[in-house]
Amino acid sequence: MTTKPKTKSPIHEAVYETASDLHRLGFIDKRKMRKFDVMCLDPIEDYDSQKIRALRDHLQLSQSVLAAVLNTSVSTVRKWEVGDKHPSGPSLKLLSLLDRKGLEAVL
């Protein structure tokens, strides 16, 4: 792997470094190395209706623009903000990216 992910603990860092060396030497295949990548990454926090609304207000986006950025429907964003639904999968990852890095990171 070209970039080293931020690890959760010193133990994870040691395991990841060992796995990375074994991958580089050919003892661990790419698929197994990706499992180590996922294991060492920080988990994505959940976004409730208030947090989504606050993020949208901070970025000064309408529901329709946020929906376009996340490649989802306006009704889905509306349901998230009301609390009828909760984001998951790629939408959750993109919300986290928007929150941490800003709109420029997604566009």
Image: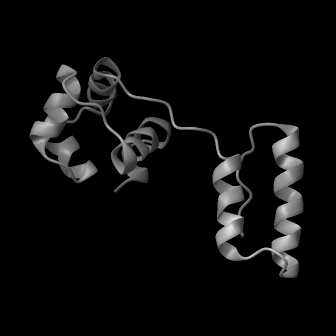
- Could you tell me if residue 29 is visible in this image? yes
Say if 100 sits above or below 19 in the image: above
Residue 41 image point, x, y percent: 65, 46
Residue 85 location in percent, x, y?
23, 30
Please tell me how many numbered marks the rendered image carries.
Answer: 0
> At 43% across and 45% down in the image, what residue appears?
93
Using residue 20 as the reference point, say whether residue 82 is left or right of it. left
Most foreground residue, 101 or 78: 78
Which of the 4 quarters of the picture holds residue 78?
A: top left
Q: Look at the image and name its color scheme.
A: one colour
Task: State whether residue 89 is above or below residue 9.
Answer: below
Q: Is residue 13 above or below residue 61?
A: below
Residue at (19%, 51%) from the top-left corner?
68
Q: Is residue 78 left or right of residue 49?
A: left
Res 29 → quadrant? bottom right
Query: Can residue 62 be seen?
Result: no
Left or right: where does residue 26 sit relative to residue 42? right
Residue at x 63% of width, y 40% of height = 42
Q: Which sits in the foreground, 80 or 64?
A: 80
For the residue pair 34 and 70, the one nearer the viewer reads as: 34
Q: Quadrant of the N terminus?
A: bottom right
Residue 50 lies left or right of residue 100; in this view the side is left
Q: Residue drawn 82% across and 66% down?
A: 20
Q: Residue 54: x, y in percent?
A: 31, 22
